[in-house]
Image: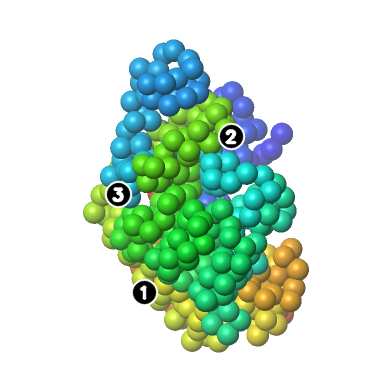
Amino acid sequence: MTSLPLPAHHPALSAADPELAALVGAEERLQADTLRLIPSENYVSRAVLEASGTVLQNKYSEGYAGRRYYEGQQNIDQVELLAVRRAKALFGVDHANVQPYSGSPANLAVHLAFAQPGDTVMGMALPMGGHLTHGWGVSATGTWFRGVQYGVRRDTGLVDFDEVRELALKERPKILFCGGTALPRTIDFAAFAEIAREAGAVLVADVAHIAGLIAGGAHPSPVPHADVVSTTTHKTLRGPRGAMLMCREEHARAVDKAVFPGLQGGPHNQTTAAIAVALREAAQPSFRDYAHQVVANARALAEELLARGFDLVSGGTDNHLILMDLTPKDVPGKVAAKALDRAGIVVNYNTVPYDPRKPFDPSGIRIGTPSLTSRGLGTQAMAAVADWIDRGVTAARTGDEAALAVIRAEVAELMSAHPAPGIPT
Ligand SMILES: Cc1ncc(COP(=O)(O)O)c(C=O)c1O
């Protein structure tokens, strides 16, 4: 039995399962007290949390609105239609499927919809910033399908479209993925669309990381260019853990069939409801401000880091994310990430393009500004953030635990002045 305090605002949970309730309370404190810089994370609102904890989760609803395999869908159909309507309006798409359980199943569904096992699919290589589910070897998408990969240029850290075109015309993939998980620069959807057209591939824009920036007008939209848009809902979009597939009408049937019955069973209705709430929030003017502030903060943080001698992949950022190569600082990414964690700064270690080190012990760390922006931090706070990272990385190299403890106290003080959305104080 843990000795952690029980969270008073979860009375039923605390009474029924104090051990678990205490862990939830501890996680709330951790998320409140630390500077969370993992670019794929965020703080959802209380409204999103409430929606995802409703009795909607008690209901089975295999199928789609009006075409279910279970009765009693009077309310669930309305919930799903609301989420679909809001997704279509927010992103300006013909069709939206809000049922994928998460980003990885969404991308597997895309494979089911547009390729046969053994067919070639093309995406950015994982160590270059792509995602596992774009045909990378250890993923089902790279073992059941034949994945071919493009990267970024060694000198610029940017995609070389001549190389992508050459590879696509040689390999003739059924699906071309653009987007990824460690990409600090704007994605040129039009350039990818032209190549996909020439190669006869379906273009899938995986905008999991930047969906909130797109919704808020802080990154160009893939919708005019991509056949299918895949996204998670829990990163910059600030919704529950889930995903959506959006597409032109011509692909709607294939996408829907692939999600259900192709890959999944009953949708997680409580998540669908929370997605609907997040989409409503993302349609408000304040969310546009949020999205632009995320980018302004990332740019300011990148400038501050460059001024402190950090090596940033591609030289900076256009979005919410910064990928740092710590080789010149003489600290492996994992050592730095673990030291920063002890200093109350949560990042993840990450490979950098052409990384000579192994994925589990790479050269870089990946940081981003979605969470700190949700707590109301602005560009004026980025010098302090860069300073903590700088001091933390130095302390990681020298093994200075006392310095890390000092940073942790400073971080906690700033965080206490900026309450985390969704977490009772
Ligand atoms: C670009 C991209 N696609 C897909 C995913 C997979 O999402 P999930 O972790 O929800 O399966 C991620 C997650 O990091 C991602 O960054």
> Would you say residue 59 is visible in this rendering?
no
Choose mark 1 or mark 3, whichever is in front. 3
Q: Is residue 183 above or below residue 33?
A: below
Residue 347: percent from the left, percent from the top? 58, 63
Q: Mark 1 falls on what kind of element?
A: helix
Q: Where is mark 1, residue-wise? A: 380
Task: From the viewer's side, name the closer residue of 406 and 270.
Answer: 270
Q: Judge the density around disc 2: few (<14), some (14-19), many (≥20) Cα neighbours within 10 Å.
A: some
Residue 177 horizontal side relative to residue 222, left or right: right
User: Which amino acid does the dot numbered 3 rest on?
Assistant: Gly
Q: Which residue is mark 3?
A: 92
> What is the number of the mark on residue 263?
2
Mark 1, mark 2: which one is toward the viewer?
A: 2
Report the side of 16 relative to 277 (left or right).
right
| Pointer 1 or 2: first along the chain | 2
Compared with residue 300, is residue 366 higher up or lower down, i.e. above or below? above
Q: Which residue: 29% across, 58% down?
A: 288
Q: Residue at x 50, y 81 (%)?
A: 315
SS at mark 2 in the image: helix
Q: Nearer the viewer, residue 122 or 390?
A: 122
Question: Disc 1, disc 3: CB below 8 Å?
Answer: no
Residue 290 found in image quarter: bottom left
The residues tagged by marks 1 and 2 sit, at their Cα atoms, a distance apart of 47 Å
User: Label 3 CB, ligand 1: below 8 Å?
Assistant: no
Residue 2: x %, y % from top left: 69, 38
